[in-house]
Image (cartoon, rainbow, N blue to C red):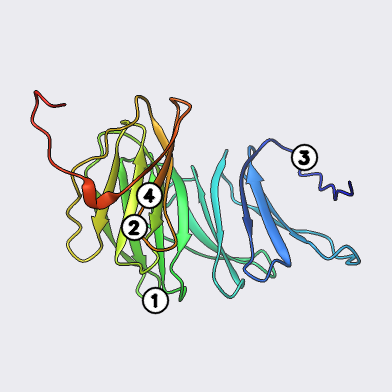
């Protein structure tokens, strides 16, 4: 089996691949991010970004591959946008009050969805630099992802719940309570009818968000 080796020089927390599959970014401890070419014949050195953070937790390329969003623990903004060709910092997005753990672009690249240690998710209008927050979890938001039609988002939290949110109302669904520990990741199926969630409880659960119902204290 043939493999390609890339020496990233530090423990890694995050990876992202461009949509055309020609480059990938890696980052983690030490706050550095490197963007590598996947062309085996390329002699280009990786683009290196020094975020100034202690840790990089999340990476995402814009749909056209020109920008890289980086979630980290560098104050005061915790999420920043960088030129993926040159490694130059473009701007920070100010709104979160603690480290950003999850970043995801919308399909057209005009919006960015983030999750944070500050217990919230945020949806950013990148043209304006403004955001709206999704408040409902009691602990860290490890993951925030769009539905296929981008009309909903799903968030996974250290509090052991998963919430589904209509983007228009930002009012959360009743919580999914199937896990017995922190939930680190959740994502929609391609048709948007199911969600897969992964937890510290060592389980991956597949469930229908339409089945979520409010529970009484006795039922919980």
First-in-chain label (1 vs 4): 1
Q: Residue at x 27, y 50 (%)?
A: 209
Structural distance between the alpha carbons of marks 2 and 4: 7 Å
Structural distance between the alpha carbons of marks 1 and 4: 30 Å
Residue 138: percent from left, percent from top: 25, 34
Q: Are marks 2 and 3 in contact (CB under 8 Å)?
A: no
Residue 193: percent from left, percent from top: 34, 57
Residue 217's disc number:
none
Q: Secondary structure at mark 4?
A: strand
Q: Which residue is mark 3?
A: 9
- In the rendered view, would you say 127 is above or below 114? below
First-in-chain label (1 vs 3): 3
Residue 195's disc number:
4
Of tags 2 and 3, the one toward the viewer is: 2
> Badge 4: few (under 14), some or many (20 or more) residues near its Cα, within 10 Å?
many
First-in-chain label (2 vs 1): 1
- In the rendered view, would you say 143 is above or below 89? above
Structural distance between the alpha carbons of marks 2 and 3: 41 Å
Q: Are marks 1 and 3 in contact (CB under 8 Å)?
A: no
> Badge 2: few (under 14), some or many (20 or more) residues near its Cα, within 10 Å?
few
Q: Which residue is mark 2?
A: 193
Q: Secondary structure at mark 2?
A: loop
Q: Secondary structure at mark 3?
A: loop
Residue 127's disc number:
1
Q: Residue at x 36, y 60 (%)?
A: 192
Q: Secondary structure at mark 1?
A: loop
Taking depth in this image into account, of 104 and 217 the one nearest to the observer is 217
> Badge 1: few (under 14), some or many (20 or more) residues near its Cα, within 10 Å?
few
């Amino acid at each position: 089996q043939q493999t390609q080796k890339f020496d990233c020089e530090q423990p890694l927390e995050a990876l992202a691949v461009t949509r055309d599959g020609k480059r990938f970014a890696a980052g983690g401890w030490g706050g550095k991010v490197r963007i590598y070419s996947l062309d085996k014949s390329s002699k280009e050195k990786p683009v290196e970004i020094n975020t100034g953070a202690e840790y990089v937790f999340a990476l995402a390329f814009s749909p056209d591959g020109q920008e890289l969003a980086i979630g980290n623990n560098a104050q005061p903004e915790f999420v920043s946008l960088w030129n993926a060709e040159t490694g130059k910092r473009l701007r920070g997005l100010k709104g979160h009050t603690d480290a950003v753990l999850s970043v995801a672009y919308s399909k057209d690249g005009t919006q960015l969805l983030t999750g944070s240690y500050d217990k919230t998710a945020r949806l950013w209008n990148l043209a304006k630099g403004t955001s709206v927050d999704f408040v409902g979890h009691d602990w860290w938001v490890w993951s925030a992802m769009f539905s296929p039609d981008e009309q909903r988002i799903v968030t996974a939290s250290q509090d052991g719940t998963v919430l589904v949110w209509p983007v228009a109302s930002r009012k959360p669904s009743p919580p999914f309570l199937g896990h017995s520990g922190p939930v680190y990741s959740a994502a929609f199926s391609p048709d948007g009818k199911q969600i897969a969630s992964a937890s510290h409880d060592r389980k991956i659960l597949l469930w229908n968000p339409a089945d979520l119902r409010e529970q009484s204290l006795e039922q919980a």
